[in-house]
Image (cartoon, rainbow, N blue to C red):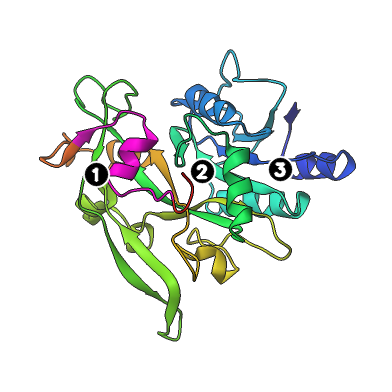
Amino acid sequence: MIHSSLASFAAHARATPLGKGPFAIVIAEDAVELDSTLDHLTHLGFRRIFLLAPEEVSLPDSLADPEIIDVIRHRTRLPGTAQEAVNTLIRLVPGEWLHYCYNAEYLFYPFCEQRRVGEAVAFVMEERRDTVLGYIVDLYAEDLTLYPNAVSLETAHMDGSGYFAETRRNEDGEVLERQLNFFGGLRWRFEEHVPETKRHIGRPALFQAVEGLRLRENNTLSVEEMNTYTCAWHNSMSAAICSFRVAKALRANPGSRHDVDNFSWHKSARFYWSSRQLMDLGLMEPGQWF
């Protein structure tokens, strides 16, 4: 179904309940790999996918599954688009699990090749958790001469090391328990082209729409416990959001494109589209789920 605006979608959803999740929101900033992003989410088992796309972004000729995809026309390059869309959906589906991403981004959680997303969130709920922290893993094409927009599924590479974390503090300088700011990837190697507030790579990968919850501008949630990387009693599952978004931006923005002719370095690794590879590199944690 195609909705003319986010407001019209919300009105329709209030009149016709959206059913059971998990739900995914895809924010299409352009048409690059939009079809593969939708296909990936469909294969993970999301019950319904909400695609935000401006009028100028053409929809794929064959959507991954038209029966589960709602198209919402929206100006997605406006500041705060992700927060507006996610917070709207939170209010519409209390108690359901959500994931949000942009086009050319791909969610991975432990054993996602064999286990559907519904199984993952069921396990997390058994652990008395209502969130799965995600880390953005930057992807980039091996050869920018062949792929000038830095996007290639077949030759995708990632940084195999160079990730680190710093203590997260609140506005009063107090340490936030079990919260860290994570850094690495292209935002770290090309930090002179990335605003300081955009350099951390943490993002909630999956979370439950609890009452009063809001996604904040810095991609953290308003319930502080939902920003923790682990629970108080043992390690928790985490996820990775493998993303071409930063590579695309560095190649497209006038301030950086002439300074970036190659993303590869001695720590680059071929990405095999495997959750096992991400776990072996320490970029994802299975917790107690085996």
Kind of residue at badge 2: Arg
Report which residue position mark 3 lands on: 6
Kind of residue at badge 1: Ser
Q: Nearer the viewer, mark 3 or mark 1?
A: 3
Secondary structure category for the residue under label 1: loop
Point out residue 222 in the picture as x, y percentages from the top left corner. Answer: 59, 67
Q: Earlier in the sequence, mark 1 or mark 2?
A: 2
Q: In this view, does 118 lie above or below 163?
A: above
Graded by Cα atoms within 10 Å as few (under 14), some (14 to 19) or many (20 or more), the crowding at tag 1 reads some
Q: Which of marks 3 and 1 is nearer the N terminus?
A: 3
Report which residue position mark 2 lands on: 77
The answer to whether 156 appears left or right of 217 in the picture is left
Residue nearer the viewer, 49 or 237: 237
Which image quarter is the N terminus in?
Answer: top right
The segment highlighted magenta reads: 269-286
Graded by Cα atoms within 10 Å as few (under 14), some (14 to 19) or many (20 or more), the crowding at tag 2 reads some
Kind of residue at badge 3: Leu
Point out residue 227 in the picture as x, y percentages from the top left corner. Answer: 51, 64
Is residue 276 highlighted in magenta? yes
